[in-house]
Image (spheres, grey):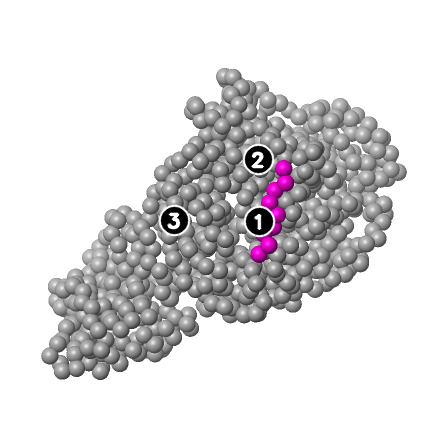
Amino acid sequence: MRFVAERLVHRETGRTRSTLAWSFYFGLLMLGWSGDFGLPSFVQAQVKPAEGESVKVFYLNEWRDGTVIGSQGDKFGISYEFANNNRQALFERKAIRLECEQEAMDLARTWANESGQFKIDAALKQIQGEQVVLIKVDLTEITVPVASLSKRDVAYVNKFKKDYEAAVARGEIPGEVSPLPDVENFTSGFGEFGTVAFGEGKIQPLGALPSFLQTFQQSGLGFNLLRKRQELVALVPVGGPEQLVLVSVKEDNFFNRGVKFPGQLYWVSLRQQKVLGSVFITPEAQALDYDPRSRLLISYAPPERGGFSAPGELTAWRLNPGETTIEPLVRWEAKLSLRAWSAFAKVINERLILAKTDSQNYKVWDIVDKKEVYTVKARSFFDAPLIVTPDRQHLLVPEDGYVTVLEAATGKLVFQLKVPSSVSGVNVNESGTRLAALTAERIYVWKLDGADDKPQAYEAPLVGNPFRARLDWLDDDHILVDGFSAKTLFRLSLELPVWTYEMDVWQRSLNDDPLRSRMLNGQVFYTAEPDRFGGALAVGVVQLPGPSVEELTANIEKESLYILKPGVAVALGTLKVSDGEQVRQWISQKVQANGWTLSNTADIVIDCEMGQMPPRTETYSQMGGRGGETNVTYSPYFANIRIRQGNKTLWQSGSSTGAPPIVSGGDIQGQVSRMQVPQLGFFEAVAIPEKIIDPQYGSGFGKSQLGLRGIVVVSTSPVGRADNPEEAQRQAAEELDKARQAGQDGGSAPAAGADGFGPGR
């Protein structure tokens, strides 16, 4: 057994300091925990502070520099600084640290051999097997065999070790964390490892789901967390014969009065239905991803000070599947984008780490050569999520008008697919042969056989999302789409949502990929918290679509579901447009062509609106990195059409101007500005479908819940569209504000390709 004080680099000075000693362990003494938990009492044989001695004193949850000015009974007068003022107060001995105690595991005491001829005043720093390392009051260190100590000291060491281990196992004091390497600043290596190029490339199949991720069977396990305040960070399916799942958590240390409890990793075996073991990692670190093939774990520690503008730290660890010994390999400074307090980082292979550094921006580091190797800037206004394929070989980048597929190891373009509108989500099926992209109104599917780059378009306005979404393939006919509060199963052959899944207990996560769950091999992995106040966690794996779904959705008569079809009456409502008469004429012609009838008293109403958005900024970079950057500012024009019944939206569509992906020649600002024109013509060009499904079927024909009971059917009737229009509008405003802010902040990376300027990738 070896207890070693963790050593961290003090960023301002480069000094190292012990955190386990007085920041971790002694902070707990201030809570009065030593006696409660059977730890050494530290009352007998302690070394008293001498007048004039420099010490640390614990005041308002922080250890502060002070000087001893005297004593009164069993308390000591300390002069210390607080809020730029000198203060004096009496403190108990346990609230004071001598210099020799500041890197030790307990207070200083008198140590002796059995004869009493050898005596020193020192504090226990480490227990190394059959030896102890002591720090003397003069700050020199001495290593002493335990066998040479007095019986009293041997008993003290043995009890200390036993009590310490027991207290760690109960979650009462922080566990041991491996010493971390110094923080490094990786060098820039853009262009050396590959850059993104523009062009379509050749469509080809992508990698299939690795075999070790195909071993899971439907099951679940609930277990108690070590501590009540541990928060879920991520759930990572690892697979293999044990059907391993790695669950990472971090401690909410806000209420721990200066004590920093470490993060923890739990190895869950779904085959054995138990937790096999756990590993401690540094406090505040979020373990975001793990790759069993490279045995790499990646964690991110947000900045302690400086707010979101300050850099944090990424750490790469070596961890064998199922084992409890972890080795920190390298730690480097990095500023990651935080969305709802979560970060995004993925292991690509044994040397490459991908992370999201800002809105729409991703960066890849080489942890062996210790450098940045390439960046990706997604042309996605609403910052749709990038996807790493299950085999970690490719990146799928959803963009406005494109799906871009990159080689994950180099950043080089594999192929690029054109999409008629902005892509909010993208994913590939588990055989790597089909790729789907979600837009506001449709799902586009490509067969990746290299024969044809034209997709099959499926009408999907009931699950469409103009912002950002996650979608997963269940099989070649079903895609699972995330909504605001539930998941919807969409059947491509019917062009209909057929079922809804929601959680029946509290669920949350600090990891942004995926938010809370993941689909693999037709199964959904999820976590559930039985108690919203924490302390326990359940991990579930269930096979979809689940009970009753296929039986209840086998014979759907789609024709009976339309709320709008030939013969139905509609009315023209609000026309907030520049030419009301012209728009009225165009929309009337479309109504007539669809076989609908116009009636001023109809309860189904068509509204039209156009206008101009607030200014936003785009950055253009010279292709190939041969020139500088140019910022342009513009105010897009928009046009929207909405068909509603009361406040219920039945169908909607829209258009807006923007900045082109590539601009050739000079006067970039002028070219972009000239493209910003009112969108009156949208109302002439827009295609209104002849038939529109009733939104009450927007989330399918039944609902199942995932939770502590596995998967349970709770409804076998239409459940209505899950998307709340008011929530959609709120999210749109929030996303727009974030996107505008990102544009004002600027910043881009060089891109390779044809001549001319384009948004930096």
Task: Identify the magenta region.
Answer: 204-212
Q: Are marks 3 and 1 in contact (CB under 8 Å)?
A: no
- Residue 644 location, x and y as percent? 75, 41
User: On the picture, is 184 further left or further right than 384?
Assistant: left
Instruction: Give whichever of discs 1 and 2 has the lower sequence position.
Output: 1
Viewport quadrant of the N terminus? bottom left
| x 22%, y 82%: residue | 152
Magenta segment main secondary structure: loop
Q: Residue at x 82, y 44 (%)?
A: 563
Q: Which residue is mark 3?
A: 313
Of the residues shown, which amino acid type is indicated by label 2? Val
The single residue placed furthest to the left in the displayed view is 117
Q: Is residue 728 magenta?
A: no
Q: Kindly identify the amino acid type of the residue bearing the numbered disc 3.
A: Glu
Sequence order check, earlier mark of 2 and 3: 3
Q: What residue is disc 2 on?
A: 414
How far, Cα to Cα, is label 3 from label 1?
A: 26 Å
Q: As displayed, is residue 245 above or below residue 560?
A: below
